[in-house]
């Protein structure tokens, strides 16, 4: 009986300790992976200093990615909630496939265009480190009639791409570190806007007046949606908010 009572006591105490053990934070979980820890150790201090220089409180900040496909550029903006966002850095996209225009089916090698968010952090990626996008989103599903829209679109390293935004390993180390720091400061959804080209090239969105863009006329509505959001960011310095209507259009709020 004594042994039985002792076993019961040990079991109860084990359950109690387990139930009251502090949960591992998102950042602590990520840092268990060597690649992430190495990247974090290299870039944490410099990122923190850059945030301070931009008057951003690193304990509670948010970030926004904007990719320009034709220009092979990735901009990252940073800021505190309800405060102005500033450009943190512009990165070169090392490799991408396809042409301007959205991705609407599997196997077309296209990089998506529209409003997305990071829905996966992959610290053990085959492409060094990777951040997954929620493609296809609701708008993609409405706009496409393909039976298979594809998926697994990432911002990743290793400089090879089939529909993804591929960076150098050195760039993805800093990008991934910044993303996990933002996620750890309670930004649950990190937005990613993917545009066909820069605002300057959009020429005030008069796409129909640009002869070289006539072959892409079916995308003009989508592109105007995308550039409206980017224009809102530049005017208000705030994260653009949007909803998706029944036709698959992005409505900037």
Image: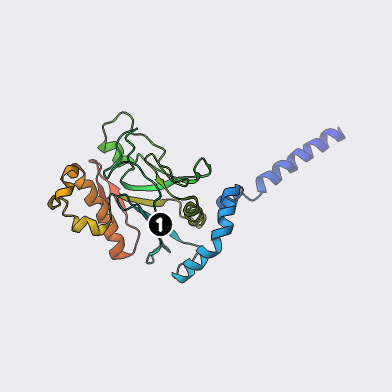
Foreground residue among 138 and 211: 211
Where residue 189 appears, as percent x and y from the top left, is: 42, 50
Tell me if residue 46 comes above or below residue 10 in the rendering: below
Residue at (55%, 54%) from the top-left corner? Answer: 39
Residue at (19%, 47%) from the top-left corner? Answer: 220
Q: How many marks?
A: 1
* Crowding near the residue tagged with mark 1, few <14, some 14–19, many ≥20 C-alpha atoms within 10 Å: some
* Residue carrying label 1: 91
Where residue 76 appears, as percent x and y from the top left, is: 40, 58
The quadrant of the rendering that contains the N terminus is top right
Which color mode does the image show? rainbow
Residue at (12%, 52%) from the top-left corner? Answer: 209
Residue at (30%, 65%) from the top-left corner? Answer: 236
Foreground residue among 6 and 94: 94
Foreground residue among 138 and 206: 206
Quarter assignment of residue 228: bottom left
Where residue 28 appears, as percent x and y from the top left, is: 60, 51
Judged left or right of residue 241, residue 13 is right
Quarter assignment of residue 110: top left
Judged left or right of residue 93, residue 20 is right
Judged left or right of residue 248, residue 160 is right
Where residue 153 appears, as percent x and y from the top left, is: 40, 41
The quadrant of the rendering that contains the C terminus is bottom left
Quarter assignment of residue 91: bottom left
SS label for mark 1: strand
Q: Tell which residue pokes out farthest to the right in this image.
A: 2
Q: Tell which residue pokes out farthest to the top in this image.
A: 147
Tell me if residue 65 comes above or below residue 123 in the rendering: below
Foreground residue among 71 and 154: 71
């Amino acid at each position: 009986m004594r042994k039985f009572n002792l076993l019961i006591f040990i079991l109860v105490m084990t359950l109690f300790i387990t139930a009251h053990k502090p949960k591992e934070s998102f950042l602590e979980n990520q840092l268990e992976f060597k690649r992430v820890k190495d990247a974090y150790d290299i870039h944490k201090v410099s990122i923190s200093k850059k945030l301070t220089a931009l008057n951003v409180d690193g304990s509670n900040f948010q970030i926004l990615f904007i990719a320009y496909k034709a220009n092979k550029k990735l901009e990252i903006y940073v800021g505190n909630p309800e405060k102005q966002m500033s450009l943190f850095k512009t990165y070169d996209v090392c490799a991408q496939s396809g042409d301007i225009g959205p991705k609407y089916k599997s196997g077309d090698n296209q990089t998506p265009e529209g409003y997305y968010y990071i829905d996966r952090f992959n610290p053990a990626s085959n492409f060094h480190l990777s951040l997954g996008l929620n493609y296809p989103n609701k708008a993609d599903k409405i706009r496409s009639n393909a039976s298979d829209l594809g998926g697994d679109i990432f911002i990743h390293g290793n400089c090879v791409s089939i529909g993804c935004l591929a960076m150098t390993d050195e760039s993805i180390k800093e990008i991934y570190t910044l993303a996990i720091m933002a996620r750890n400061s309670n930004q649950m959804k990190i937005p990613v806007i993917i545009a066909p080209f820069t605002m300057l090239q959009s020429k005030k969105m008069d796409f129909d007046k640009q002869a070289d863009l006539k072959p892409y006329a079916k995308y003009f509505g989508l592109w105007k949606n995308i550039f409206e959001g980017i224009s809102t960011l530049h005017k208000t310095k705030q994260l653009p908010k949007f909803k998706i209507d029944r036709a698959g259009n992005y409505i900037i709020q």
